[in-house]
Image (cartoon, grey):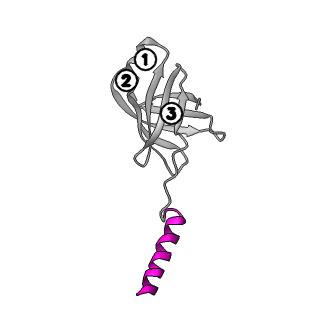
Amino acid sequence: MKTRLLFFHLLVSTSLSSGPVFSQPKPSPLVGRWHTDDKTTIEFTPCGAGACGRQVAAERDKDKQANGKFLAQDVVLDKNNLFTGLVFDPGNGKSYKATWLLSDDGKTLTLKVKWGLMSFNEDWKRIK
């Protein structure tokens, strides 16, 4: 009986001291704050399996109404090394499929949105 208790104690103490058995998912490289071309600040945070982007500040008065709102959701890395998800336009209330391409140095994020024959590209700069 003492041998079993000693073995159990050693097993538990070794498991607890060596850290978690399961590894934690790596946070998205998008996590942080980004400045858009129109001086709006978007903050990406972990969200589900990927990241979500919330507008935290805007320079122009007409853009400030979206402060605190999620403008990007379900952003995950796909097999082509592009981040894909939904982007929301607070001006018209619509959502669009979007892709984001992160530069090799991690300092620039290019948003690409396409609807029908029209498309939109914008570079965001990492600020934090």
Under circle 1, the secondary element is helix
Q: Which residue is mark 3?
A: 112
Under circle 3, the secondary element is strand
Residue 13 visible? The answer is yes
122, above or below 2, in the image: above
Q: Look at the image and give the residue range highlighted in magenta.
A: 1-20
Residue 87 visible? The answer is no
Crowding at mark 1 (Cα within 10 Å: few <14, some 14-19, many 20+): some
Q: Which residue is mark 1?
A: 63
The amino acid type, in three-letter code, at marker 1 is: Asp
Going from N to C along the chain, the mark reached first, 1 or 2, is: 1
Going from N to C along the chain, the mark reached first, 1 or 3, is: 1
Q: Do tag 2 and tag 3 residues touch (Cβ < 8 Å)? A: no
Q: Give me the residue at 46% from left, 39% from top.
A: 45
The amino acid type, in three-letter code, at marker 3 is: Lys
Q: Quadrant of the N terminus?
A: bottom left
- As rendered, which of 35 and 104 lies closer to the eye? 35
Taking 52 as reference, is 14 left or right? right
Mark-to-mark CA distance, 2 and 3: 17 Å
Q: Position of residue 7 (x, y in %)?
A: 47, 81
Q: Do tag 1 and tag 3 residues touch (Cβ < 8 Å)? A: no
- As rendered, which of 62 and 68 lies closer to the eye? 68
Residue reaching furthest right? 105
Q: Position of residue 32 (x, y in %)?
A: 53, 36
Mark-to-mark CA distance, 1 and 3: 20 Å
The question of residue 11 being in magenta is answered with: yes
The amino acid type, in three-letter code, at marker 2 is: Pro
